């Protein structure tokens, strides 16, 4: 069935006016934008403060170093991730929507965010492997998302062939984010011998997730 208008998903951010007036928010916005242009180790403090319409003095009054700004950026991103998940995966949003369009909308939404913020996701993946603070925040967001997905699966037990919906939701999360995390690590080439368009990648992830759940929709359709 087609998605209702209420099912259109958006990333939840703080109000732009409040954020644009705050020096910290401007620096965080600058860092987020610059990560889409260059790796973090190539982003200088001078460039960050120029982009954020701030000053070197104001920067070091708030942060001991550049990596401290990155920690704050990940804190903001994690908080936004929680709020976005609460809105996007609310049970009432998906009332009357069957499993396949729900999964398809969720995958397409997250995949588009990885396209729009590939540099940020790339840096988060890298930091997760070396920084316990990043791992703790990422795991907290993941746990929150998994529990919300589990509730949506509970509402669709007649469409799935799994006993433990929390375990199933955890596996869906692993499938989705493992594939997308890998995709942003390979900047100039596909991670394997087959190059997939974004639409083909979304379709493949949807089919894998539906297949794990034992849904007939796992046979899927061809992506352009």
Image: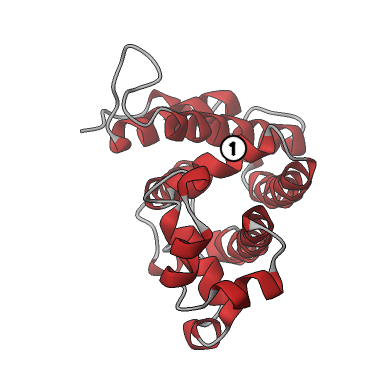
Q: Residue at x 69, y 28 (%)?
A: 162
Q: Is residue 13 above or below residue 135?
A: below
Q: Is residue 69 above or below residue 223?
A: below
Residue 11 spot, x, y in % from top left: 49, 64
Residue 64 visible here: yes
Q: Residue at the location (69% across, 66% down)? A: 63
Q: Residues within 10 Å of mark 1 (few under 14, many from 20)?
A: some
Provide the residue designation for mark 1: 125
Residue 202: image x %, image y %? 38, 36
Is residue 102 something one can see in this rendering?
Answer: no
In the foreground, 107 or 3: 107
Q: Is residue 118 left or right of residue 214?
A: left
Q: Quadrant of residue 123?
A: top right
Pinpoint residue 12: horizontal percent, then vertical percent: 54, 69
Q: Nearer the viewer, residue 146 or 21?
A: 21
Name the residue at the left extreme.
224
Q: Which residue is found at the position 52% from the left and 34% from the top?
A: 181
Instruction: Name the residue at 71% across, 34% down.
Output: 130
Name the image colouring. Answer: secondary structure
Q: Is residue 154 left or right of residue 92?
A: right
Q: Residue furthest front?
A: 57
The count of marks equals 1
Which residue occupies the foreground of this view, 192 or 10?
A: 192
Residue 209 vertical placement versus 60 (above, below):
above
Picture coordinates of residue 168 (x, y %)?
69, 32
Quarter of the image where the C terminus is located: top left
Q: Check disc 1 and report its element: helix, strand or loop.
A: helix
């Amino acid at each position: 069935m087609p998605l209702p208008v209420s099912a259109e998903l958006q990333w939840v951010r703080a109000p732009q006016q409040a954020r644009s007036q705050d020096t910290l928010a401007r620096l965080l916005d600058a860092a987020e934008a610059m990560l889409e242009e260059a790796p973090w180790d190539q982003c200088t403090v001078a460039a960050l403060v120029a982009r954020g319409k701030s000053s070197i003095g104001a920067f070091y009054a708030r942060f001991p170093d550049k990596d401290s700004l990155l920690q704050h950026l990940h804190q903001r991103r994690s908080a936004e991730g929680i709020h976005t998940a609460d809105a996007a995966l609310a049970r009432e949003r998906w009332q009357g929507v069957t499993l396949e369009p729900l999964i398809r909308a969720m995958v397409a939404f997250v995949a588009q965010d990885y396209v729009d913020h590939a540099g940020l996701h790339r840096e988060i993946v890298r930091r997760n492997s070396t920084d316990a603070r990043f791992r703790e925040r990422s795991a907290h967001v993941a746990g929150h998302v998994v529990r919300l997905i589990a509730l949506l699966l509970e509402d669709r037990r007649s469409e799935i062939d799994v006993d433990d919906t929390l375990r199933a939701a955890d596996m869906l999360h692993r499938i989705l984010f493992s594939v997308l995390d890998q995709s942003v690590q390979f900047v100039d080439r596909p991670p394997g011998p087959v190059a997939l368009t974004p639409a083909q990648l979304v379709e493949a992830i949807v089919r894998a997730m539906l297949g794990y759940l034992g849904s007939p929709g796992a046979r899927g359709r061809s992506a352009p």
